[in-house]
Amino acid sequence: MKVILASDHGGKNLRQEVSNLLEELGIEFEDIGCDCEGSVDYPDYGIPAAERVAKGEFDYGIVICGTGIGMSISANKVKGVRCALVHDVFSAKATRQHNNANMLAMGERVIGPGLAIEIVKAFLETEFDGGRHENRVNKIKQFEEQ
């Protein structure tokens, strides 16, 4: 499993917590920043992360900003990406089981590090159920191809 990790200034601290978790779990990952103190634009980090997931360079992407909203919107503009904004463990599992999400967005100003760690674990450990859910995901893919 390979994961790409990105944040803007609003998600920098939570991104470090997730980075530490990925190291602990022995998961291969690349952290593409941001490493600045000042304000930056979330699309400058979310879109490149999403593009690399869509190209197949990474199995999953995790993007973090203040609320997670900007990162999720940005990532979802990339064809082939299904980025879920998640702030609870149930949704982290459900989006993998039912939506086959390949990216996770979270908000540092919304959840604390302990919950974020549990969300990331649930997201990465949960498999896609397929079946009737596969048909739904395929409808999204078909729409993207139009």
Image (cartoon, rainbow, N blue to C red):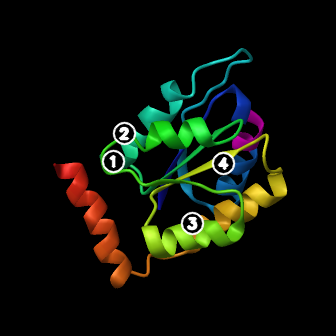
Q: How many marks?
A: 4
Tell me which label, 3 or 4, sits earlier in the chain: 4
Q: Amino acid at mark 2?
A: Glu
User: Residue 10 location in percent, x, y?
Assistant: 72, 30
- Report which quarter residue 12 is drawn in: top right
Residue 84 image position (x, y, % from top left): 53, 55
Query: Image point 23% across, 54% down: which residue?
Result: 143
* Magenta segment boundaries in residue numbering: 12-16
Check disc 4 and give the amino acid type: Met
Q: Which mark is residue 54?
A: 1
Precedes in sequence: disc 4 or disc 2: 2
| Whole-percent x, y for residue 93 in the image | 59, 72
| Residue 25 screen position, x and y as percent | 66, 63
Mark 3 vs 2, N-terminal side: 2
Q: Secondary structure at mark 4?
A: strand
Q: CA distance from mark 3 to mark 4?
A: 14 Å
- Residue marked by disc 3: 124
Query: What amino acid is at disc 3?
Result: Leu
Residue linked to disc 2 = 51
Earlier in the chain: of badge 3 and badge 1, it is 1
